[in-house]
Image (cartoon, helix red, strand yellow):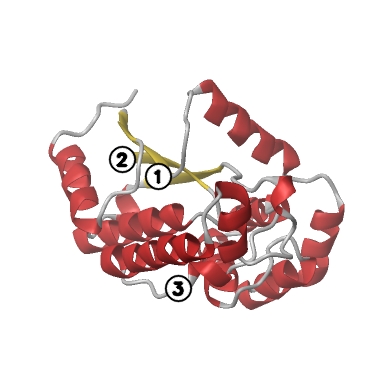
Amino acid sequence: MDIVMWADLQCPFCLVGEANLMNALHELGIEDQVNLDIKTHQIHRPQDGDGQKEMLQIFQDKEGFSKEGAIEHVAKINQMEKDEAGLIIDFGKVHESVDLDAHRLYKYAADHGKAAKVRDLLHKAYFEDLKILADWDTLLDVAKEAGLDPDDVKKMLESDMYKREVQDDEMEFRAFGIESVPYFIIDTEVVPEHLTKEKMMEVLQKHLDHPVLKD
């Protein structure tokens, strides 16, 4: 089974969608039967700053929420994470920033057999530890904890490595006419939203029962 997922590292809907996908694959026992390709789509807008503001404030500045409305919106997101994926976060306290380099680190990690570990650590750094993903110290700490050589990762960050790969993902995102993330293509079926674990299991089981013939 081939699964392509477009996601951003700072998107709470991507977080829950990805968690539900991984949990569904695990419960079905088919992790080793899936070719998973996670592609980049960056949601951060430069005008929202580069980690200086908490998301609670960004919602007020960007979306026009009142403070009370922003608090209510954040509470709904936190509840969704808990109810749908068992994740405990306080999304109002995260510090969104340009995460191009974090996506580059993920692609570097994929080439060094550490993709899943690095992605989990990037999610933890942002959603739980409230770190700024534009901060190279954050990325180097993630790299070290994942078992990558921080010196090699620093050289990568100082270069243009993996920028083209991120740009290619973004170009493909636009070419498909995708409007939001997460966005899944499972074999040939489009799933343009996050699903609960149970719904994702239903979709995956359907593809197990009726596999797509490949050349």
Q: CA distance from mark 3 to mark 1?
A: 29 Å
Q: In this orientation, which residue lies closer to the viewer: 41 or 71?
A: 71
Q: Residue at x 35, y 42 (%)?
A: 193
Left or right, residue 182 beside residue 80: right
Label 3 Cα crowd, 10 Å radius (few <14 / some 14-19 / many 20+): many
Label 1 Cα crowd, 10 Å radius (few <14 / some 14-19 / many 20+): few
Q: Is residue 121 visible?
A: no
- The answer to which image quadrant residue 112 occupies is bottom right
Disc nearer the start of the sequence (2/1): 2
Q: CA distance from mark 3 to mark 2?
A: 31 Å
Residue under label 1: 35
Q: Which mark is residue 207?
A: none
Q: Residue at x 59, y 35 (%)?
A: 169
Q: CA distance from mark 2 to mark 1?
A: 6 Å
Q: Position of residue 139 (x, y in %)?
A: 71, 67
Q: Position of residue 109 (x, y in %)?
A: 63, 58
Q: Residue at x 24, y 29 (%)?
A: 212
